[in-house]
Amino acid sequence: MPVPEGVDVTADVEVEVEHGQRTDDADLDALAEAPQGATEYQPSASWFDDDGIVLLTWGSSSCAPVVDDVQPAQSGATVTFAEIDGVCTMDMAPRLTPILVPAGDDDRPFELTLVGGGLDAAVRVEG
């Protein structure tokens, strides 16, 4: 799915996030350069606050990932996802999952180890 028209991914973007009765702003850091071509549907992650990461994964739009546990580590965190027990649509959609972790440091590498929920991978968190 492309970025909405008029959004420059090489410039910082501020988005408003709504969840139920809560509304908040999130600042998304710019990419060094705009991606070219089709995605390979690999997960990616970026800081949206000092202790918040947004994880982008791809899969069924009706079966979004559900964080079961987050365990901090020296240079990252292990995120365990609940197993989905049910019927999911056969579409391929981007899914954003907010993850709270201990305060990050933009100057040091930070990596998420994803476990369960069909998301087993290691993902570097971009600044």
Image (tube, rainbow, N blue to C red):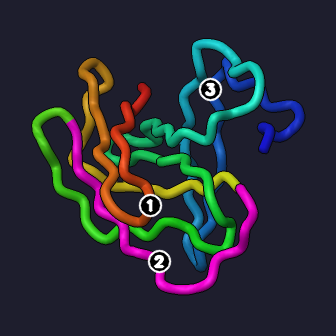
Q: Amino acid at mark 2?
A: Ile
Instruction: State which tag comes first along the sequence, 3 or 1.
Output: 3
- Tell me residue 107's x, y (percent): 28, 18
Residues under numbered marks 1 and 2 in contact, where contact means CB atoms less than 8 Å apart: yes
Which residue was labeled with disc 1?
A: 118
Which residue was labeled with disc 2?
A: 84
- Tell me residue 40's x, y (percent): 63, 35
Is disc 1 placed on a helix, strand or loop?
A: loop
The residue at the far top in this view is 32
Q: Residue at x 47, y 41 (%)?
A: 48
Does residue 78 show up magenta in the picture?
yes
Position of residue 86 relative to residue 74, above or below, is below
The numbered disc on residue 11 is none
Does residue 87 show up magenta in the picture?
yes
Residues under numbered marks 2 and 3 in contact, where contact means CB atoms less than 8 Å apart: no
Instruction: State which tag comes first along the sequence, 2 or 3.
Output: 3
In space, the residues marked 2 and 3 are separated at their CA atoms by: 34 Å
Quarter-of-image position of residue 90: bottom right
Please provide the residue range marked out in magenta: 76-92
Q: Residue at x 29, y 62 (%)?
A: 80
Toward the viewer: 28 or 119? 119
In space, the residues marked 3 and 1 are separated at their CA atoms by: 31 Å
Which residue was labeled with disc 3?
A: 12
